[in-house]
Amino acid sequence: MTLVEPPPIPRAAGSVPLFGHLFRLFPDPLPFIASLRQRYGDMVEITLQPGTRTLVVQDPALIRAMLTDPIASTLDKGAFFDEMRVLLGDSVVTVAGEEHSAKRRQMYPAFARPELGRYVEIMRTATQAEIDTWEPGRRMDVRETMIRLSLDMLMQTIFSDRLDAGTFRRLRHNMSTVMDSIGVRLMLPGWAKRLPIPLNTRFERGRADIRETISAAVADLRASGDDTDGRDMLSVLMNVQDEETGRRLTDEQVCNEVLTLILAGQENTATIMAWVLYELARHPDIEAKVLDELDTVLGDRPVTFADTGQLPLLDRVIKEVLRLHVTGFLLTRRTLTETKLGAWTLPAGTNLAYCQHALHRDPDLYPDPLRFDPDRWLDGATKPPPGALLPWGAGKHRCIGDRFATMELITGLSTILRQMRFTLAAGQTVRPVARVTVRPGKMLMTVESR
Ligand code: HEM
């Protein structure tokens, strides 16, 4: 038998001594990462942080293999999540292996069907309260507005009315400071993260304040004796018992998980909601059909949990936005032991990453990939191969909030679209930019009453 040597893994052009690809990654890393798909094959090596090497996995089948077992069990979460751990501590999103499985089991009750049904009412009330602040005829930053809305929806599902307005505003401000800093810190070497520069001091201050606020909310609830009322996600999490070990979460673990949910949930949902409004503003024919569908299915009544799956066009619009404008930039993993991935045997400690955004815009996987076309998801249309559509990831770390996010999107969008219309200036387009996630650059639109 002859052994076939795997092809060498190319190193991406544009690397310079000491700094690696740093100058290709700043100020916006997206064009560089996206260009790798066109220029290189299944895997390519880049330097994400000076002094380190990362293999960017590009082939859909290899990405899927990396995310699912048996390979997934030989990996931890890697560089991106090392940075997250500074903020979140050990939580479902930062740990791997058995510890991760146990944490994930403990989170399930917060996302169970009856809970989701109750959250819809909270989401709708938050959306209506936001709409009531809009002045028809005003131009507004739609991404910023959606960030505010998704944070309100999430925080009210987590805390119900347990935070006062001032604390809520401070938490909202600190979350956006921290999110903005993380994306840049990800590309800095360790020593630079310790320098007393504004980026680091803002991050540290925001981080400390957020943790203090959430810890205080947990302690207050525990002290009040109302922690078993199951009224919101916080009280659900404070009472979950691991079915295998019988253990409950400590207050610090509840704090880590709550912060994880806010961080993982807020920006992604807001971004998708903003892009849906943008694409519908650019495609009034599709928007009219979505409104028809809402009228036919809902009549005058508000959307409820039972409507999930009953709005096929809105579902396809959301699915197409999750493809074209997916929020995932570079999701990382790291081998814990020698690992075979495709034709390659990777030593322990190899950094891996994949870019959902570039994957979802690959012309080999999606004809005319930049065209917004919800009908590519109609039954009978050509389906992309497994591993080509991964808005929620795959395998044991697949998004735990996927159904929650879908409910937020359906509730928020149907409430907004039936009352308000967004328009763009003639010829206006909005470009995606990569920070921690891929998100729209400045997205100004005029809001009108319907
Ligand atoms: C449109 C909105 C969302 C998108 C596109 C999205 C996407 C993702 C993706 C791609 C992952 C996998 C990351 C990886 O493989 O490393 C993930 C994980 C996760 N997401 Fe989401 N997410 C969304 C909304 C939410 C919401 C609303 C929540 C919570 C309320 C949430 C909580 C989480 C958590 C806790 C994880 C970690 C799961 C684990 O490692 O077991 N996400 N999400």
Image (cartoon, rainbow, N blue to C red):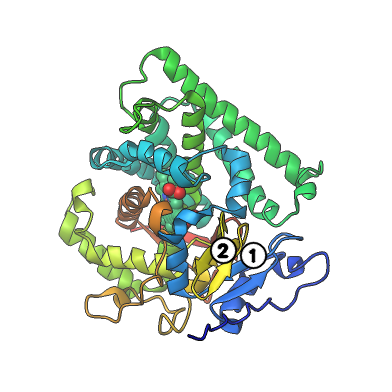
Q: Is residue 73 visible?
A: yes
In the rendered structure, the answer to whether residue 307 lies left or right of residue 343 reads: left
Where does label 2 land, which residue? 353
The x, y position of residue 276, in whole percent, is 40, 63
- As shown in the figure, which amino acid type bears the numbered disc 1? Thr
In the rendered structure, the answer to whether residue 313 lies left or right of residue 59 reads: left
> Marks 1 and 2: CB-CB under 8 Å?
yes
Q: Which numbered tag is attached to residue 184?
A: none
| Label 1 SS | strand
Q: Residue at x 63, y 44 (%)?
A: 178
Q: Residue at x 78, y 43 (%)?
A: 194
Structural distance between the alpha carbons of marks 1 and 2: 7 Å
**Residue 161, relative to residue 294: is it above or below?**
above
Q: Residue furthest front?
A: 1
- As shown in the figure, which amino acid type bears the numbered disc 2? Ala
**Residue 217, relative to residue 294: is it above or below?**
above
The x, y position of residue 272, in whole percent, is 44, 59
**Residue 423, relative to residue 109: is it above or below?**
below
Where does label 1 land, which residue? 54
Label 1 crowd (10 A; few <14 / some 14-19 / many >=20): many
Closest to the observer: 68 or 33?
68
**Residue 106, relative to residue 266: is it above or below?**
above
Q: Residue at x 24, y 42 (%)?
A: 113
Q: Quadrant of residue 9?
A: bottom right
**Which is more N-terminal, label 2 or label 1?**
1
Closest to the observer: 200 or 68?
68
| Label 2 SS | strand
Whether ligand 1 has any atom under 8 Å from the Cβ at mark 1 is answered as: no
Q: Is residue 301 visible?
A: no
The x, y position of residue 160, in whole percent, is 38, 30
- Quadrant for the C terminus, please: bottom left
* Numbered label tally: 2
